[in-house]
Image: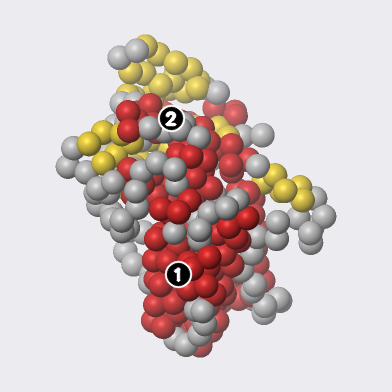
């Protein structure tokens, strides 16, 4: 089984023969290229031409993040899976407002369901989140894409407001980005960036084009379908990681830098990445395919469902937590 590699310090990736090395002020370390499926760089990482060639040959993408943890871009191998039919149908479902709204509404239904599942879990643990559950339950998701996005915005707002009832440490005032100004906003931003890349990685293993999306507006310099897919899984993966790390004091104020904004420091990033990776690898028995699948693979299955929908094989129903 191959795993992502996360680099949180500055350095250089270089190649000698068929071996890939990471070199920094601490020394030179060989990387197990046969056990890596992607490299995520959170420090300033340069690639020697030989390293780039080896990574492309092995089909290993390299993702780059800025100092705030936001995704900046990727060095991707040649696309392995091509299907003109899927891309044409995918685009037609974006171009047709009614068809696009059907998919966008399903995505938000998935978000709503997974947020409610999360809140009900904490309600059973004695957290006072009932008012937020009621607010979210009232949202009737319908209309055009603009209306559906308004539904989504209100759902996220109520959800984030509930954090003060769930978290034992830190406070959530409002969602802020670029840069985040509180510890919780820093954690959400960092986790969302990780999930975006994980979703993008799963899309690249299918015939879908990552720039053609339905809830988010396609735009230059971003793969908006990854945003669509990631949003469904934020309550399942990112927030569960945050709640565990904060409520168990696995992350404290010492794990953040306070400057222009609030950011995880290198030690904090390593703690978050370890827990995030563990969550991605968590498996659960799937009721339809009758076998255990990882949380990460659930995102791949979401892509397959979209393909079946745009090809007219089966109507899309977004992922809903069943446990």
Between 5 and 295, which is closer to the camera in this rendering? 295
| x 49%, y 45%: residue | 243
Residue in the picture at 55% in, 81% down: 102
Between 284 and 255, the one nearer to me in the picture: 255
Q: Is residue 58 visible?
A: no
**Relative height, residue 231 to residue 264 (above, below):** below
Residue 22 percent location from the top left of the image: 40, 21
Circle 2 crowding by C-alpha within 10 Å: few under 14, some 14–19, many from 20: some
Q: Does 223 sit above or below residue 153?
A: above
Count the numbered circles shown: 2
Q: Nearer the viewer, mark 1 or mark 2?
A: 1
Q: Residue furthest top?
A: 27
Q: How is the image coloured?
A: secondary structure
**Residue that protrudes farthest toward the left in the picture:** 260
Q: Is residue 216 left or right of residue 298?
A: left
Q: Earlier in the sequence, mark 1 or mark 2?
A: 1
Residue 68 to residue 249: above or below: below
**Residue position for label 2:** 270
Which quadrant holds the C terminus? bottom right
The residue under the point 34% across, 48% down is 171
Seen in the image, is 284 located left or right of residue 77?
Answer: right
| Residue 93, horizontal then vertical, whole percent | 52, 80
Callout 1: 10 Å neighbours few (<14), some, many (20+)?
many
**Residue 15 disc label:** none
Q: Residue 110 lies in what quarter of the image?
A: bottom right
Query: What residue is pinned by disc 1?
Result: 155
In the rendering, at what x and y percent does residue 64 appear? 36, 41
């Amino acid at each position: 089984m191959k795993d992502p590699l996360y680099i949180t310090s500055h350095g250089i990736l270089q190649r000698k023969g068929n071996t890939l090395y990471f070199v920094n002020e601490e020394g030179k370390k060989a990387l197990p290229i046969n056990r890596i499926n992607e490299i995520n760089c959170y420090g300033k990482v340069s690639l020697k031409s030989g390293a780039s060639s080896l990574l492309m040959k092995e089909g290993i993408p390299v993702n780059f993040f800025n100092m705030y943890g936001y995704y900046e871009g990727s060095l991707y191998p040649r696309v392995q899976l091509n299907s003109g039919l899927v891309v044409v149908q995918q685009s037609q479902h974006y171009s047709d407002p009614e068809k696009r709204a059907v998919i966008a509404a399903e995505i938000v239904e998935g978000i709503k369901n997974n947020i409610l599942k999360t809140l009900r879990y904490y309600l059973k643990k004695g957290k006072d989140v009932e008012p937020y559950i009621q607010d979210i339950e009232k949202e009737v998701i319908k209309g055009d894409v603009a209306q559906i996005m308004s539904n989504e915005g209100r759902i996220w707002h109520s959800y984030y407001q509930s954090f003060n009832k769930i978290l034992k440490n830190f406070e959530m005032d409002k969602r802020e980005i670029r840069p985040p100004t509180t510890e919780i906003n820093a954690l959400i931003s960092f986790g969302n960036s990780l999930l975006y890349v994980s979703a993008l990685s799963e899309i690249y293993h299918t015939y879908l084009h990552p720039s053609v999306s339905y809830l988010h507006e396609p735009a230059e310099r971003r793969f908006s379908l990854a945003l669509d897919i990631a949003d469904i899984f934020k309550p399942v993966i990112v927030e569960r990681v945050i709640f565990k790390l904060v409520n168990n004091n696995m992350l404290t104020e010492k794990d953040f830098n306070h400057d222009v904004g609030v950011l995880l420091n290198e030690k904090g990033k390593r703690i978050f990445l370890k827990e995030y990776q563990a969550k991605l690898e968590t498996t659960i028995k799937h009721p339809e395919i009758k076998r255990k699948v990882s949380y990460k693979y659930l995102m791949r299955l979401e892509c397959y469902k979209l393909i079946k929908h745009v090809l007219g094989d089966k109507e899309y129903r977004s992922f809903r937590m069943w446990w």
